[in-house]
Amino acid sequence: MQSKPTTAEEYLGSIPEDRKAVIIQLRNTILENLPEGFEEKVAYGLLCYVVPHSIYPKGYHCNPKLSLPFLSIASQKNYISLHHMGLYDGPLLECFQKQWPNYSSRKLDMGRCCIRFKKPEEIPFNLISELVQKMTVKDWISIYEKALSKT
C-alpha cells in the first residue's frame, strides 16, 4: 500500500518528473503572492492553501475539523489544475475571465473554480500571480460566510 503525502515536500516528491518543475514553479508563484494568513497544507491529495483554524476556528462547513480551503494545485492524469474557491461567481471570476485573453491565446478551460492546463507551458504565471493577490483572508471568510448564509 502506497502512503499518501502529508507535507508539501512529500507531495512534490510524488509528482511525475515531467511535471515536477512546473508544479514547483506554480507553488512558488502562489507562495510569493499569497496574502498573509493563508497556510500551505496537503489535503485531499492536493497541495492546498487554507485559512487555518487559528484564524477561522469554525473550519470548513463540510467537515469543521478541516481548515477552510481557498486554493489548491494538483497534477492530474491529463492536466494540471488550479482550484481557486474565490472564483465561484462574483467580481473576481468576471475579472479573471476578462483578463485571460491578455495572458493566453488558448481558450480558458475552466469548471466552477477549477482552471485546467493541459500543457504546462500554457500556464500564465503572471495572471496566476495577480489572481492570488486579489483576495485576502478577511475577504475570503466574508465571501464564504455570505455564501453559507444563502444555503
Image (tube, grey):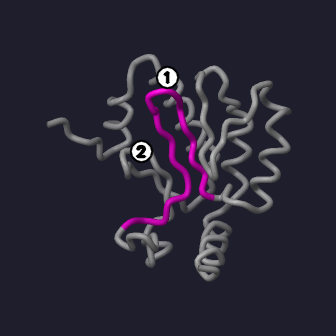
Residue 77 at x, y percent in the picture: 44, 28
Which secondary structure class fits the magenta region best?
A: strand
Q: Residue furthest top?
A: 18
What is the three-letter code of the residue carrying label 2?
A: Leu
Q: Nearer the viewer, mark 2 or mark 1?
A: 2
- Residue in the image at 63% along x and 66% along y: 140
N-terminal label among 2 and 1: 1
Residue 24 at x, y percent in the picture: 49, 30
- Foreground residue among 126 and 146: 146
Looking at the rendered image, the quarter that the C terminus falls into is: bottom right
Residue occupied by mark 2: 46
Q: Is residue 94 left or right of residue 149?
A: right
Give me the C-alpha separation between circle 2 and circle 1: 16 Å
Q: Would you identify the image quadrant in which residue 142 lies?
A: bottom right
Residue occupied by mark 1: 21
Q: Secondary structure at mark 2?
A: strand
What is the three-letter code of the residue carrying label 1?
A: Ala
Residue 39 at x, y percent in the picture: 48, 56
Residue segment shown in magenta: 66-85
